[in-house]
Amino acid sequence: MIEIRACTLQDAVAVGALLRELGYPVSAVQAAGRIREFGGTGADPILLAEADGRIVGLLAAHLCKMLQYARPVMRVTALVVAGNVRRGGVGKLLMERAEQIAVAAGCELVELTSAMDRADAHAFYRALGYEANSLRFRKPIVGAG
């Protein structure tokens, strides 16, 4: 059975490992700092999927107000499922819980971005009823950090 629960500081090692699996080099120490920081905002839920005592999935989100929308928006900022359990329903459970949080927060919509080369992820989001509607642009800030 898969349990969806809130992330705690004790989960930092697993969070770092999952983020690395997604392609982001985050150490356990860095993950702990971010969990601590985001845990205090009330607007940045981090959800974990746990199966048999093992963390197998992660979803991070940000609840925010935007000038163009009448109600808040939930932006899913990270979603990763451990490679050995993908296609087993973990991602769907995480997204369902995120949507429940969005409803409770009065959000107008849930949005997310996905790298251009993640075709399997795009198919997954479409199967959940999400539609592609924009193209994200970004520019690294030299000297930031």
Image (spheres, rainbow, N blue to C red):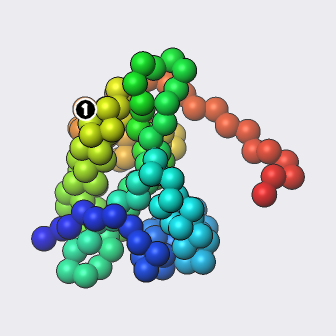
Residue at the image point whose x is 52% and y is 26% from the top: 66
Please indicate, yes or no, whether residue 99 appears anywhere in the rendered image. no
- In the image, 37 versus 94, the foreground residue is 37
Residue found 42% across the figure and 30% down from its top: 72
Residue 59 against residue 128 in the figure, above or below: below
Taking 26 as reference, is 61 left or right?
A: left
Q: Is residue 52 visible?
A: yes
Question: Which quarter of the image is occupied by the N terminus?
Answer: bottom left
- Which residue has dot 1 on it? 129
| Percent x, y of residue 112 | 44, 39
Drawn side of residue 141 relative to residue 121, left or right: right
Which of 12 and 128 lies nearest the eye of the viewer? Answer: 12
In the picture shown, does residue 53 fall above or below 60? below
Q: Which of the 4 quarters of the picture holds residue 104?
A: top left
Q: From this view, report whether residue 23 is shown above or below residue 110.
A: below
Name the residue type under label 1: Gly
Name the secondary structure under disc 1: loop
- For the C terminus, the image quarter is bottom right
Crowding at dot 1, Cα within 10 Å, few <14 / some 14-19 / many 20+, comes out as few
Q: Is residue 41 left or right of residue 71?
A: right
